[in-house]
Image (spheres, rainbow, N blue to C red):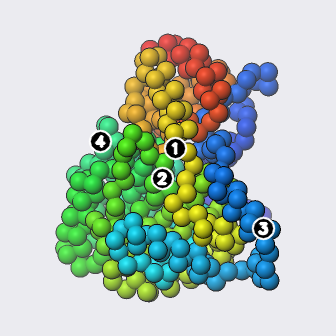
Amino acid sequence: MSISSKVREGIAASSWVVNIFEYRSPVVSEEKEVYDFRLGNPKIEPPAKFVEELKKVANNPFPGMHGYSALAGHIQAREAIAQTLSEERGLSFTAHHVIMTSGGAGALNIILKAILNPGEEVIVLAPLYLEYPYYIDNHGGVCCVAETNADFTVNIDTISAKITPRTKAIIINSPNNPTGMIYSGDSLKSIARLLNEKNRQFGKDIFLIYDAAYQDIIYDGNKVPDIFNIYSNTIFAASYSKPLSIPGERIGFAAVHPAMKNSGELMDALTFANRVLGYLSAPVLMQHVVANLQGVCVDRVEYQERRDMLCDALEDFGYSFTRPMGAYYIFPMIPGDDVLFAQGLSQEGILVLPGKSFGRSGYIRIAFCVNKETITNSLPGFKRVIERFM
């Protein structure tokens, strides 16, 4: 008996992904203290309002409470999200523009399943979220990588060069994982103009898939531009994992721009994809809980304090990086090979991911959503390693 050749190749190419969900690395001895910065698995607990709402729902059961919801999700949750989107964006969203999903990953996968024909292309911006190529391949698509600038801002020329008659969508992730970059309104408007130009040229509509997993985790008074008021052919993929600090609960949603042509057909396709991919319905208990938690978020100050602790120290040690505007990752440029550098850090008990995993070698990704003690105690090791590689 043998497994799929494609899956075998995927396992070989990304075996390290499995390791990021394990606490220890083979490079680290059992005796050494481990400082794990690999995974965006927040150590900050959910807001008190989440705990209160969870208790309220759990302590007031009703018939059918734990059964399947409608394939698109419970109407109460979808209406609550549609109302919030309408108020925030000044557009007329209804529950029929929203589908509840199994986290942000579930949202992205049903979107790609709904829109892609075999061989159609999806553009992603590098540095990129490491699972995008696999999600695209899941549904017969081809991943096309467009580089951003050295400071991680949008390079419209590299995007333009990647658009062909086979282009079906572009994924925009802002704030970005792994860089923390928020793409500016002007950059997004440039992308929208380019897509509209190509739509006219090719006689079809290119989708913009907006991965908004970190839209609520922003710092220094930064704002995330409203993509819905920039490009009407937008599909929004959102998650409660980060704002509510509940990644293990796997709850999110997708939303379709209310002015999109054939939006009803697309919603039917998303609902079909939710079923045939085996999600059936998003976790129903969480649907009931998040319906009354629109706008609730963890204390961003907690994350900003951790960002500043780590950034200030790394800067003093000689690391070169762009201070993240949002999300909870730092993506420093490092001297030499990023895999060797990550291995050097692991010998100090510090676990990070090499930049090549995110489509840009010569960098490492550090997830600072950890306990403050982890940051403080790891700093001598960060200093020793950069001094060895300088």
**Foreground residue, 333 or 371?**
371
Evaluate if marks 2 and 3 touch, with contact meaning CB atoms under 8 Å apart: no
Q: Earlier in the sequence, mark 3 or mark 4?
A: 3
Q: Residue 353, how many percent across, how many down?
A: 56, 36
Q: Residue at x 79, y 25 (%)?
A: 30
3 or 1: tag closer to the N-terminus: 3
Which image quadrant is residue 264 in? bottom left
Q: Secondary structure at mark 3?
A: helix
In the image, what residue type sits under mark 3?
A: Ala
Residue 216 circle label: 2
- Amino acid type for the residue under numbered disc 2: Asp
Residue at point 72%, 80% (across, down): 68
Q: Residue at x 28, y 78 (%)?
A: 204
Find residue 58 and name its label. 3
Between tags 3 and 4, which lies in front? 3
Picture quadrant of residue 121: bottom left
Evaluate whether residue 263 shows in this view: yes
- Numbered badge on residue 300: 1
